Image (cartoon, rainbow, N blue to C red):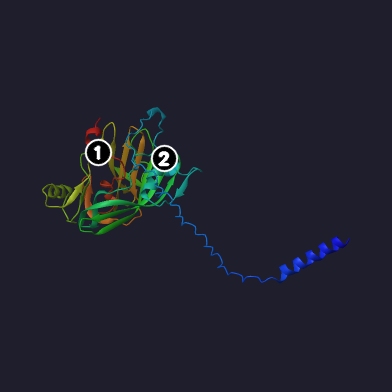
Amino acid sequence: MKKLIALLLAAVMLLSLAACGGSAEPVETAPATTEAPTTAPTEAPTEEPTGAPTEAPTEPRVAPTDFEAVDPATLPEPIPVEEQLQSEDTQTVTLGSLEEYEDLLWSLGFEEVRLAGTHEAWAQKTANEFAIADAHCEPVSLTYNNNAFRLDFTYSMVTRNGETIKEDGWSMYGTKSTIMANVSPMDDEKFYASDSTSETPFVTMIDGSQFGSADEALAAFQAGTLQGETSTIKVQNPNYEEDIKHFGLVEDDSKQFTTKTVYYPITGNLYNYMRNPDSEGVEKAGFIGGTMGYTTSVGDTALKMCFHYLFPAEDAAE
């Protein structure tokens, strides 16, 4: 027991000495510097250059020229267009461009219509003066159904010196027919027709000169001492027919009217050009079939009007 106590005391003393022993001053150690992790700069991913989306090229708009022949037995007799436009399916539209009018008429089967572009015309400046001009169509509206149409338009002519002359009240009528015929409202009991194929041509005198007789006026015209124009041309071949018609009022012969008829035997498409009879005309000297005098002429510019297809010269007589 005494040995055990002695051992315990000895152990306590050793522990006391260890606790009281001088301790060395603590060595200051610089805190370890930890560098902030640096991440290598990564370049932003570059996208492959993508070009702007390109639209597929559109094919140029081409007017139809390869007209499909129709069986003449399927064509109707000529019927006045205004009569045909009385049906319930008739509608009137105003479109934004000449091409839109053309596209609509082509879709109806009237593929010979040519509204875009210009053609040479005779612009009536005054009763005594006319000028060569470039003419174009300014549509007002289109009234149509599956069988016929009426295109109302202003005929605009720009002379070679830049002067613009406009004629309102023009209409182009179109329908199907077995033959060339007048299907405009001019075919009315109020009007009479003068045959353009008669031996005595229709002559319009431009300078307003007075003559004692029709023969005297015609002689002056033929001698080149009088400005004027004749309209005796009638075209007729297997592909194309054209005629100029002159009309007068039955009750009042002081006003004369000119219309133009165009017919395509291949397709059976028939077109008439006519200016509203109530339009203001031009007073001029002229005669029909030997009767000379002054009349108010309406629609003379139809002579050169051409909003329809013309076959090349080599194809016209095939």
Q: Which residue is mark 2?
A: 107
What element does badge 1 sit on?
Answer: loop
The quarter in which the N terminus is drawn is bottom right
- Residue 266 lies left or right of residue 220; in this view the side is right
Is residue 304 depicted above or below 20 in this figure? above
**Considering depth in this image, is 227 or 192 the residue closer to the camera?**
227
Q: Amino acid at mark 2?
A: Ser
- Residue 295 lies left or right of residue 113; in this view the side is left
**Considering depth in this image, is 125 or 95 the residue closer to the camera?**
95
Q: Position of residue 202 (x, y in %)?
A: 22, 45
**Considering depth in this image, is 221 or 8 the residue closer to the camera?**
8
Mark 2–mark 1 distance (CA, rounded to whole Å): 29 Å
Image quadrant assignment for residue 295: bottom left
Q: Residue furthest right?
A: 1
Is residue 243 depicted above or below 93 in this figure? above
**Considering depth in this image, is 114 or 83 the residue closer to the camera?**
114
Q: Residue furthest front?
A: 3
Q: Position of residue 271 (x, y in %)?
A: 35, 41
Tag in front: 2 or 1: 2
Q: Earlier in the sequence, mark 2 or mark 1?
A: 2
Q: What label sits on residue 250 in the rendered view?
A: none
Mark 2 neighbour class, 10 Å CA radius: few under 14, some 14 to 19, many 20 or more: few
Q: Position of residue 101 (x, y in %)?
A: 39, 47
Q: Which residue is mark 1?
A: 234
Is residue 109 depicted above or below 218 in this figure? above
What element does badge 2 sit on?
Answer: helix
Q: Position of residue 210 (x, y in %)?
A: 17, 55
Mark 1 neighbour class, 10 Å CA radius: few under 14, some 14 to 19, many 20 or more: few
